Structures are given as structure tokens and as C-alpha cells.
Amino acid sequence: MTPVGKNIEDMKEDDRGIRFGEGVGYDDGYGDNDEEFVSELPTAEEENAVEDEEIDEGNARSHPSSIIGRSSTEEGGENTDPFKGRSSGSGLVNTRIADRESDYQRRRHDRVLREEGVSFKDAMKQANMEKEEDELHRDLAKLQKEAAEAADMADDGGENGSRRRKRRWDATGADPTPDNKEDSALISDNESIVSSQNKWDVDPAAERSSSSRRKKRWDETPVISASGVAATPMVASGVSKWDQTPLVASGAQVGATPVVGASAGRNRWDATPLTTTTTTTGVPQTPSGGLVSKAAALQQEMESRNRPWTDTALDAILPSEGYTILRPPANYIPLRTPGRKLLATPTPLSMTPAGFQMEIPIEQRVDASIQEIRAAYGVPVGPETDQSGLPSSLPNIKPEDMQYFGRLLEDADEDKLSKDEQKERQIMALLLKIKSGTPPQRKTAMRQITDRARFFGAGPLFNQILPLLMSPSLEDQERHLLVKVIDRVLYKLDDLVRPFVHRILAVIEPLLIDEDYYARVEGREIISNLAKAAGLPTMIATMRPDIDSPDEYVRNTTSRAFAVVASALGVSALLPFLKAVCQSRKSWQARHTGIKIVQQIALLMGIAVLPYLRELVEIVSHGLEDDMLKVRIITALTCAALAEASHPFGAESFDVAIRPLWKGAMEQNGKSLAAFLKAIGFIIPLMEENYASHYTRLVMPILLREFHSPDEEMKRIVLKVIQQCVATAGVEPDYIRQEILPEFFKNFWIRRMALDRRNYKQVVETTEELANKVGCSDIVVRIVDDLKDDSEPYRRMVMETVKKVIENLGGSDIDDRLEERLIDGILYAFQEQAVDASNTGANSFGRESQTMLEGFGTVVNALGERCKPYLKQIAATIKWRLNNKASTVRMQAADLIGRIAVVMKACGEDQLMGHLGVVLYEYLGEEYPEVLGSILGALRSIVSSIGMTKMQPPIRDLLPRLTPILRNRHEKVQENVIDLVGRIADRGAEFVSAKEWMRICFELLEMLKAQKKAIRRAAVSTFGFIAKAIGPQDVLHTLLNNLKVQDRQMRVCTTVAIAIVAETCGPFTVLPALMNEYRVPELNIQNGVLKAMSFMFEYIGDMGKDYIYAVCPLLEDALMERDPVHRQTACSTVKHLALGVAGCGCEDALIHLLNFVWPNIFEESPHVIQAVMDAIQGLMVALGPNIILQYTIQGLYHPARKVREVYWRIYNSLYIYNADALVAAYPLIEDEGGNTYSRTALELFI
């Protein structure tokens, strides 16, 4: 070990030494000089300083274990749990809400709930007491902080002249100076410190003995303290590792308290157990021998094996009936071996084995029940039987839910329970089914708890629902279900919920600030329904004490809840209350919360605040001149929210706020200035042109001054205000060019702005708005050279801005020189993209690469034929990048070809396109499906642009190469290859043999099963193109054979393909084959034929009039079939047929079909009855409502209720469809005495 603090000369002059052969003590060897002796333990700051010095001097620990120890300490030590993210829920995503909450959201658990029935007066008293208590705590904390700062300043002044103590391993000394500091032993893998003093366990003997402190190496054996009084060992957190020998401390009188680590609950499975044995006697401990330990273990095992059977265990194994437990004889004495009595001899405690013994597992305990064993292993438990002795229908209970549902496991006699207890158990069982049950159980329980809500009562229901919602183990799905329970229960309970409004709000309000959008929507819905049930007075009385709460969390959630109440019950009803709160003089918190309520109303209701805009602005406007800074800030933000919500109306409503806002913008700074500028920025677009121009010129000096602000939030607000001011009609382009653009580009178009996503987005949007005002070239010429900047994020920001500007304005005002610089910069930026070659996954083509690709394509398409001189260079770049080893680069290059193919055609570069087509053709063996999909998309663009005759390679060579690719199951590949094949079939089918098309037909059949709808639609369309190219017979034969498969999705898509073939080639080519196929006595085939006819008549429309009489016999048979699916599909066919031939003179055939459809109106299957109703509505269009009415009148007053319901349903649809036409068909009623029912005017007209 290298000496520290001593040089060679000092060592030579050191007269300390030991003569050979002489007796020596510790102090003889290391001296009695106390000059350099450390008299007290160092503080943590001093220790860190020493370690820093050692690192600087090169003496720091370099062993891997030391390095790992330091790194683990920095990263959170051994407390880091690698499985924390998947510790609950499904194991894939942590669905436990408490694990995702921030510290701010966890404050919902600290909220104090008021008791039921507390009056408004008592609630206000309690709120005032809480407020006073909070103020006292704040004052006390402030005083303590000031006292601590004063003490620190005094200590700093006294230590300035003191000499730094030496703390080296070779320091010596005796008689250490006593100190009152609290010391402890630090045990780690690099040093061991034995305390010289203890705070509470001081021993005179230990006081007299001197102790030393020295650095320990990582490879030394830890010291075992054998002193009379053991110090409290502390193992440094994050430093003690698995490769460290555990320190075993043992003492005689007072035992040491082991403290492992600095964090509570730290228990590492990979650490050697630290054993500390404490005795109360002076007898030293003697480790027991191996034979004794083995005998003890053997005795324990024999006792567990020969333990007598209990009645419970026997009942669990054998039936309780038919068996009798025999009693042992009275004179029976079990034999006890004398050898076993040896271990029963009383032994001093210090002679017991000091080893580790496992406790008896719970499954081996005699008194353990099945429920206890399952709970110990974390298995959800549930009641084994219900009240009738049958197996229980309740779901299992998770261990963390035992505190809520544990009473369901108790065996209780329902007859002996009181009514309240019975209701409680019923509610508990229903909630358990809703929370943890299967979907059928959940649905039934939800209906029962909703229907019996008033029977159960509000108190028992909410006393069990609300604690569940506050459970720390609650998951997203469980919260959604419980919130749904509250929502449905509120409708039933109505005004009975009033005593529980505060408790419900305390649980539901945190949903309003949840990160999940749907949770916020659910929270708003619950509070809205609660307000409608309880009424506005109850809601105000309940939430009024929380408005000026000292807790900011409570005020925040209360303001959002009030906004929901205003939205539900009307803003006008809440205006008087808001006016009173916002003008409160007692508490600035009340004013702050009231103004925030108005802000939340504006954010929640949007343009709906317009009728109340003037009143709301007047209510909050005085806050712009408030004494409290927070009130002024929230008032300005509220004005901004109101202006944003009412855009583009309501400028006159802000008259009372313009002057205070303007005055504040001149006087404020920092966050308050940002809020005032934001309000002005949202109000200016509401003004007329001349006023907008005037105020823009007034506010611009302030904005130009804040261009230099270091605050990121201020920069974003300034950018937003400029964007809004520039967009107004009254601002002149010359003013923008002269006053704004120079400073804007100087301060915001810098590299640092591209690193933050929010700044990046705002700069791009503001520049786009400036370009819309001053033109494309004025903006592009300032940033075009930045396309060659060294920073890639900055280049990307430039590219996105250029793309948006040219998309909006085109490239007509770009001159030749700017055009050259633009193409040069885009080529440079495109080539210099940083690509990680290891990123070859499906999602590696991210937003950054997409920005470059879209920017390149947009510029080339905007310039059009002006790009012709640069196309060869662009093509060379593309070909070079197609050879790159990174798949993302190849994919981007192929996508670029697809975007610029149209421009290449416009420039007359057919030869270049053909060359690129050959290059892409050679890359069809690409192994990455994402890249292959892009290559196919590029080929499709080239084929569409250049045409079939000029395509290189020829179509006859390209299509056979595509046939194997049809088997690829990647969605992108499937979509692009089918589109390419469809275009070839549509425009160049004659270049390929019929045999090849048939081969493609067989491959396309599998595409009909694709998950993506676009792929299935493209495959069906391609069938039509192929059928048109080679004739429908062969294609139809393939499709009809496909009706025999079992896969339903395949059959449905096949029927759609048959209908497309019929539409393309004419129904007469398909219908004979379909009708012939219907003769096969197989349900799937017949259903497929009917489905194909349904789609066919839907597609061909009025062409069906030529075929209606031919298909009538087939539909008659199908409508009389016993199989309900037959009748359902036939009704669907009748519907499309009737809608297609309406007005074509086929009423006789339709009435004939109506006679077969009508008997099916009493079907109970929801699918069949819906198809029947659709068919009747289709016939209603074709035949007119009067004929259907004649069928309907017969059953409107039938004695059977179910018959009447069906007929009235049909009549209602008739009435909705055409009520006027029914008048002429109503039956004639004879006159009765003085009542005349004849309609002479109608009869005369007819």
C-alpha cells in the first residue's frame, strides 16, 4: 500500500521503530504522539472532500467492485428494482394507477374528508381553522429556516481561520479529545470505521481505551468488534455488494442494533445474511458441533412427520361420515428413546446453534387452512361455497382486496344478520363481481346494483364504492368499472346523494387532472350528473369551503369541478356566485380560485361562452390590478382563454380589460409579463383591421425586447403572439420585413431552438405565418443556407419550414439563384442524415427521416419542370443510397422515387425512369419487408407515370417476378404489390399470358383473409381487372370453388369478388353459374351464393330489372328454408334488389317476394329480424308505403302484446319514412251520429 501524506525524507527522519526480539505493544509501534490523531469522526461533506482529493491525486479505488459500488450509489443503489415497471397488472404494461402518479397527484390521499351531515357553518369553521393552522406552520418553517441560515453563517465565520485536520491512515495519537458528535461505525467494501464514542451506550471502559480510524482496502477482512459495548453498525447504501464478506457483530452485555442500508425495507436476495446474536448473560457463545446440529434437525423432521393427526386434517382427507376416530387405550404409553432425551437437557442460551433455520412452511402447518395457504402464496382467494352449500359463484379475491371483501369469506348465517348487514354483504358481493368477475358476472351485477340502488341506499353504496376508488392497488380497468357504477347509481338515487356530495367529489375530482384523456372525460361526466342530481345550491355549499383552501391541489381540482358544474347547470346560474368569489377581500386564494373557475369554463365550453363573455370579462378584469402576483397572472391567462374560446367574435367584450392589460404589459416582467402578452396576443386577432394594426405596432417593441429573454416559456409566448399579430389583416408586409424579420431570424433561428421540441414546433409555425404574409422567397432566402448547417436537428427544422412554406405558397417566386441554392442545400441535408445501421426494425423510419423525405418531395414537385437540370444528380444520390447497408436509408431512397416520378415524367426523363425501374427490379429480393414495400411503391409510381409500353423492365418480365411476393404476409408489402398488380391488370393485361393471370388469381385468394381492410378491398378490385382481362369464366370457377372453405371471412370476400366480376363483365356472365352452384346441398355454398347475389344486386343497381324474374324462384326457396341464416341472407338480397329496381315496373315480382318475407317478422334472432326489417324498408321504397300499410293494419290491434309490438314497430318506420303518403291509405270509417269521418276533399281529389 502506498503511504499517503508522508514523503521519503519524513520516513527517514521518523525515529519510531521496534527492535528485533523485544516485546512490543500497539502504541510502541505507531507512537503515542497525539499531534496528528483524529479526535472525532468526519462529516459526510468532509468524507466526500477527501474522496475527491484522492481521485485528483490518482489514489482512488480502481477495483471493479469499487467502481460498481460508486456507480450503483449514483444510480439509486441496490434499491433499484428492475421489475418495477411490470410489477402489477398484466405484467406487460403496469396498469396500477398509483405507480404512475406524480407526487402532485398523490396529494389526493392527504385530503381530509368532512363527516356526513356537517352544516355549511361548521364546514366553513373547519376550513378557516385549517387555513390558520397552515399559516402558522408556514411562519414557523420560515423562522426555523432563518435561524438555520444565521447559524450557518456563524459557523462559516468561525471556521474560516481553523486549520484543516489530517485524516490519514498513518495518523497516530492517544487521549482523543472528547466530542459531543454522534458517531457510528461505517462498514463498506473500502473502509471500516470503529467509533470512538457512542451517544447512548457509552461504556467507561470503552471511554478509557483509545481507538483509531484508518482506511481499509477492498480486499481486507472486515473487522469483528468484540468490545463490551457494540456500536450500531451502519452498512452504507449502495456500497455493500454481493461479493463482500458479511460482518458479524457480537457483544456480551448490550447487543448492537443492526441497520442494513439507509433506506427502509431494503432486502436484497443476493446478499449474504448478516447474523447478529445477542445474549443477556456473560456466558460466551460456543458454536455447536455438526453432530448436534444434525441431531436437532433430525428430531425436528421426525416430530413433523409423526405429529398426531388433527380432526380438521382427517376431515379434509377422509369423508366425515362412515369413519370413527379410535381413542388410544388408557394404559398406552409411547416409547421414548433415551437418546432423544439428551437434547431435551436444559442448555444455556449461548450454546444453542447459531445457524440459520427456516420456519415451517405454511402448507405444512396443521392449523393452516386452504384460504391461508392461497393468501400466503398471493393466489386470489374466494369463498368455497355459497349460502346453499353449492360452489360459490363469486370471483376470487386478490390479497390486496382482502381488506374490502374479506368479510365475504366469513361463514355467516343470513337469517341472523340485520338488514343493514345483509345489504352490506349483497353490495360487497356485487362490487366484487363488477371489479374482478367475468364479463357475464360483471354485466349481471351492474344491472342488479343499478336497479336496486334506491333499495340499498346511498350510504351503504358509497361507503363501499368510494374506498375502493382510493385503493392504492387500483388499476385502470377497475377504476373505469367503478366510475361506471357511480354514474349509473347517480341516475337512480337522484337527490339522495346530497349528503355524500363532498365525499364523491373528493374521489372523482382527481380524475379531472389525470393524464389519461378518457379518465378526464369520465370524471367530467360523473360531476355533471352529480350536479344535476344534487342541484346547484348543494354543489355550491359543498365546494365553497374548498375555494380558499391553503392546499393548492384542492383549489385546482375544485376550480375544474366548478367549471363542469357550470357547464352542466348553465353559466348564467353560476354568475352571481362567481362575481362574489372573484371580488373576495378576505382571501386572495378565493379570488385566485374564482378567476381560475372562469378560465376552466372557457377551456371546457369553448365558443359556448360567447353569450356570457361580457359578464365573465367584467367579473375577472379587476384581477389584472390585484396586489397579489398570482392573481394577476391567472387573470391574464383567463383573459387569454376567454379570447381564444370566443375567436373570432367578442372583441367589444374585452374593452374593460384592454387598458389594464396594456398598462400591465408596460409594468410587469417575468412570468406576469408572459401572461399579459399572451392575453394581448389572443385579443388582437378579434379586433377590426385598423385596431389590430395599431395595437400590433404598440406591442411589437415589447416583443422585440423579449426576443433576448433567456426564459424558454417567454420565448414560446412571444412566438405565439407574433404569429397571432401577423395573421391579422391590418398588418402590412413591409412593416413585417423591416421591423420583425431581421430580429426574428437573429434570435430564434439558432441551433438551440431546434433541440427542444416545443420551441421547434413554435418557431416553424411562426415562420410559416410570416411567410404567408411576406411571401415565400423572403423567408426561404434567409434560411436556405442553413440546410448545410452542421447540426442535424437544425437542418431538419429548416427542411420542415421550407416544406410548409412551399406547400402553402408554391415556388413561383423563387428565382434561379435561389433555386440552385435550395436544391443544393436539400441534396446536402438529405445525404448527411445520421442513420444508425442497427435500426432495422419496422418503426425505425421515424419522424426525422419522414421530414427530410417529405421536404425533398415537396420542393421537387413545386419546382416541376425547373428541376430537369438536377434530376440526374438526384437519381445518382438515390441509386447510391439504395446500396446503403442501413435498411432505413434504402427505404427512404425508394420512397423518394415514388414522390418524384411524376416530375421526372413531366421533364421528359423517360430514359432515366426506365433506368431506375431496372434498378428497383434488381432490388426485389430485398429481405426487409418495410424496404420491399417501399420498392414496390416506387415501381408502382414509375409504371403509372411512364406507361406500360415504355416500362423497363417489360411488363411480361416484371409480373412473374411479383407473383412470389404475393405470398409475403407483411401488410405494407401486400398493399403495394396488389396495387401494382391491379394497375398492370387494368392497363396492360395483354402483355401477360392468361396462365400467369390464373396463377395470380390463386395467390390473391389468400389476400382475401388479410386483416387490413384496404388490402382486402384492393384484392377484390384486382379480381375484377383480371376477369375483365382474361374473361370471367376461369376467374369465376376459382371463386366458386372458394365458397366451399370453412373460413367465413374468406367466403365473404369471395362473394364480394364475384359481385365485382359481375359488375365488370356483366351479370349475365355470373348469374347462371351462381344459380347452378346453389343446387349443391351444402349450407356454406348456398349461403355464399345468396351473399354473392346480395352484393351483386347492390353493385349493379337498376341492371337488376332484367334478372329479377330469373332469381325469384331461388329467393322463394331461400325464404322458406329452415336455416335462419338462409332467410337472413335472402332478406338482404331482397332489400338490395328492391332498392335497385325501384321505379322500373317490377312491382308484381316485389309483391310476390313480400309475401315470402312477411311471415319472418316474428323471428327472435336479432340478426334475422334486422335483415327482415331492412327488406321491408327496401320494399317500402320500391312499392310505396301504402301497400306495406295494408299489411300492417291487420296486426296493430291484435290481442297478443308481442304481435302488436312487431306491427307497431313497422308502422312507426312507415310513419317516419313518409307520413303524408299514408293519409290516402288510411281505412274509411263510417259516420257515427254527429261525428262525420268522411274525407270528401280527398275523395274528390282521388
Image (cartoon, grey):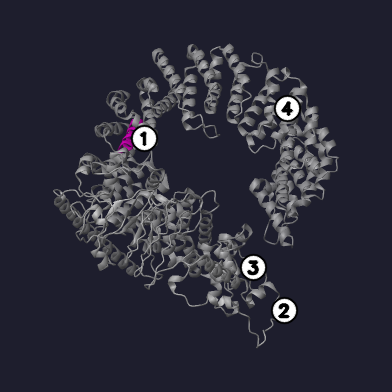
Per the rendering, the mark at residue 443 is none
Mark earlier in primary sequence (2, 3): 2
Mark earlier in primary sequence (1, 4): 1
The residue indicated by pointer 1 is 759
Q: Is residue 126 left or right of residue 664?
A: right
Where residue 476 sits: x, y (%)?
51, 54
Residues under labels 2 and 1: Cα distance?
81 Å
The residue indicated by pointer 4 is 1000
Q: Nearer the viewer, residue 402 or 482?
A: 402
Where residue 1048 sits: x, y (%)?
73, 42
Q: Quadrant of the C terminus?
A: top right
Q: Is residue 1010 left or right of residue 178?
A: right
Residue type at mark 1 is Asn
Residue type at mark 3 is Ser
Residue 113 against residue 773 in the figure, above or below:
below
For the record, the magenta segment spans: 714-727
Residues under labels 1 and 3: Cα distance?
60 Å
Q: Nearer the viewer, residue 293 or 871?
A: 293
